[in-house]
Amino acid sequence: MGLQACLLGLFALILSGKCSYSPEPDQRRTLPPGWVSLGRADPEEELSLTFALRQQNLERLSELVQAVSDPNSPQYGKYLTLENVADLVRPSPLTLHTVQKWLLAAGAQKCHSVITQDFLTCWLSIRQAELLLPGAEFHHYVGGPTETHVVRSPRPYQLPQALAPHVDFVGGLHRFPPTSSLRQRPEPQVTGTVGLHLGVTPSVIRKRYNLTSQDVGSGTSNNSQACAQFLEQYFHDSDLAQFMRLFGGNFAHQASVTRVVGQQGRGRAGIEASLDVQYLMSAGANISTWVYSSPGRHEGQEPFLQWLILLSNESALPHVHTVSYGDEEDSLSSAYIQRVNTELMKAAARGLTLLFASGDSGAGCWSVSGRHQFRPTFPASSPYVTTVGGTSFQEPFLITNEIVDYISGGGFSNVFPRPSYQEEAVAKFLSSSPHLPPSAYFNASGRAYPDVAALSDGYWVVSNRVPIPWVSGTSASTPVFGGLLSLINEHRILSGRPPLGFLNPRLYQQHGAGLFDVTHGCHASCLDEEVEGQGFCSGPGWDPVTGWGTPNFPALLKTLLNP
């Protein structure tokens, strides 16, 4: 009887809006550039919402991540299974019961959970959703380069106060799909062509990073890699095949993707999607590759959140995932950013290597109380991912030493404190850099990124059967670094060792061994009189522009092969 009265009370709260709270008061709700409202959604239209349920034992999970990722730990490489993670973080019976009954009372239908039981995705009518989440007002929007349609609420939502211990946030109301920062730069001018290359191709990458034709997957292990795409665009098999015909002639490779998770549309291919697949599969050559594809999702879903949910619902996953997605930290609610960070921690506990692009805005810039500050991005700033910055050749048409690509994202988180694994490296940078920006521009005690880098300037990509030159961005460097880690995993697996897993504790302990140190150049930042467009500068050792540097494959393999 007491429980029934409690549930009736919950439903009464839904209807009255009293004794409620806002889970995401700090979530930015302004319309992104290029998006327009098409008006209110039909009350009878169906909507998919995702409820992030409160998890348990997160401190223990953090301890386990450290234990399985630290080469000095006896637990190193003894990763948790998805079922182990589920047993640890599964919401309490009270949370599960309370939320399910609340949704049932509101008329939610077709609710689907995941193996970890910490996400619940439900279908409701717009009318039911607006009753369930007082304050929400759903509109149709269209925007982005592919005229994407979404349903979102420009107004904040409330939840009954009784749900505060049970629900982190509700997904599908505010955050818009990301847009690509990938760009096509003008071709540099050059006189004479002897000994020159005309843009970055797989052969240029393999030569610069010292790979031989034998540095490919064996085709006999259970090794695999993946890229994830959230841009409402997709790749074409025919583009991949043509890319390999043009640029893959001197190394063994696979000419098709092993598995697509999600739906592939039938329109034009996107340059970002084509780039991710082509360079992951040419750097990590001859290794089974998955693609997580967002096209075909429902208008109410958040693509990045859907990817995290997929990870929580599949036991056997590729070992390396490369992701070219990011948002400014300040645009995301604290509830959302902390929960996503926990999802990344869950992946680290399972031994997944997650590589995120550091972004293409240098240190970034925004105005806080009338003063400029640098603007970090997330998930690049998460302490549980390996973040990849960008470089250029010192001589644009020669395979030479690398310098900073001025767009390379990097800096210091305003949300996450500096993790212990990078304490020594970051303290050394802060005490020795001769070109440090004024302290008011950044949070020196925050998680510093990137961790590593690779070439990000002047790539050739095949999209819609057309070879396209001079494509640039950390969306290019990330799959390249990921592919090389997949090759190292291949050696580890064939010699009976576990895959690399979460790389950062090992990377920092080894002080960047196996990487080319990038010591010249600075990235972009605020265009004001104080810093004049210059952010951080690279130097010896780790720096927040190129991390520890770019891969020297034979040395990196030697460094990471044992134990």
Image (cartoon, rainbow, N blue to C red):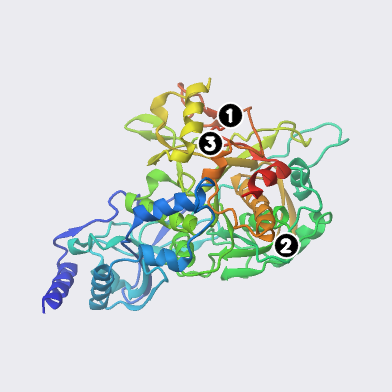
Q: Are marks 3 and 2 in contact (CB under 8 Å)?
A: no
Q: Are marks 1 and 3 in contact (CB under 8 Å)?
A: no
Can see residue 301? no
Distance between mark 1 and mark 2 Cα atoms: 36 Å
Tag of residue 224: none
Viewer-closest of 377 and 45: 377
User: Dot 1, how many residues are within 10 Å of its Cα: few (below 14), some (14-19), or many (20+)?
Assistant: many
Residue at screen point 26% across, 67% down: 95
Percent coordinates x, y for residue 100 in the rendering: 28, 74
Q: Earlier in the sequence, mark 1 or mark 2?
A: 2
- Compared with 140, 329 (above or below) is above
Q: Quadrant of residue 302?
A: bottom left
Q: Earlier in the sequence, mark 1 or mark 3?
A: 3
| Residue located beneath label 1 in the image | 538
Looking at the rendered structure, the kind of residue marked 1 is: Ser
Tag of residue 362: 3
| Residue located beneath label 2 in the image | 239
Label 1 vs label 2, nearer the camera: 1
Looking at the rendered structure, the kind of residue marked 2 is: Asp
The residue at the far right in this view is 194
On the picture, is 69 further left or further right than 27? right
Q: Earlier in the sequence, mark 3 or mark 2?
A: 2
Percent coordinates x, y for residue 57 in the rendering: 33, 58
Determine whether the residue tagged by mark 2 lies in a helix, strand or loop: helix
Determine whether the residue tagged by mark 1 lies in a helix, strand or loop: loop
- Compared with 366, 242 (above or below) is below
